[in-house]
Amino acid sequence: MSNTEKPKLSKRDNIIQAVKFALFSASAGLIQLGSFSLLDLATGWSYWPKYLLALTLSVLYNFTLNRRFTFKSANNVPLAMLLVALYYAVFTPLSTWWGDALDKIGWNEYLILALTMLANFVTEFLYQRFVVFGKSINTNDLAKKEQMKNKAADEDAANN
């Protein structure tokens, strides 16, 4: 498949992608929650610097795993990272603003973080699936190996 050709994914492929994204996002969420909690315990920082550092760690981890294993993309890494950075150029200021505003009116920091992480999960999946990796899904070496394996299995089934 060329990089300009739109990927053809079955319903099963889409479900598998969504499940992988959810699992990697959950593990990234643990990284974000863990680093936020450590910063909360170890520093006297307000909400927003703890959030920004924890979010950055989570994003780097999540991008790397989803590019390789969920979307199996061989696209240009700097370009993909730039597109993700553009998403976060919008999401981060907004989420930092609403998180800080809710913190100042007395909302629990962990409730704010959980709601923000949920909003991030949904919007980032859609953005990565259709914008960042939309035309390069299943183009990396893992996808090519799977395609060869499936082709060989189909040929074996046809010969038997």
Image (cartoon, rainbow, N blue to C red):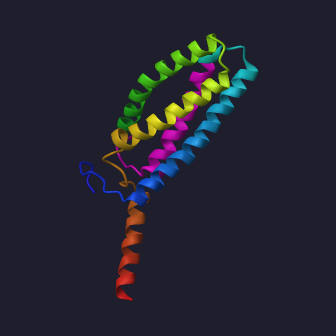
Q: Does residue 108 belong to the magenta stretch?
A: no
Residue 58, compared with residue 101, is above or below; it is below
Residue 52 sits above or below residue 84 on the image: above
Number of marks in the rendered image: 0
Viewer-proximal residue, 141 or 67? 67
Q: Residue at 75% across / 21% down in the picture?
A: 42
Question: Range of the magenta residues?
Answer: 49-77
Outermost residue to the left: 4
Question: Residue 135: image x %, image y %?
Answer: 30, 47
Q: Residue at x 57, y 34 (%)?
A: 58
In the drawing, does residue 80 fall left or right of residue 41? left
Residue at the (44%, 46%) spot, across then down: 67
Name the quarter where the C terminus is drawn: bottom left
Residue 101 x, y percent position in the rendering: 57, 12
Q: Between residues 154 and 10, which one lies in front from this camera angle?
A: 10
Is residue 62 on the magenta stretch?
yes
Residue sticking out furthest to the right = 41
Position of 157 with respect to 8 (left or right) is right
Q: Is residue 17 left or right of residue 8?
A: right
Image position, residue 39 (x, y; %) = 69, 23
Task: State the residue lying farthest toward the bottom.
Answer: 160
Q: Residue at x 60, y 37 (%)?
A: 29
141 left or right of 23 in image: left
The x and y percentages for residue 44 are 72, 14
In this rendering, the answer to whether 66 lies above or below 142 is above
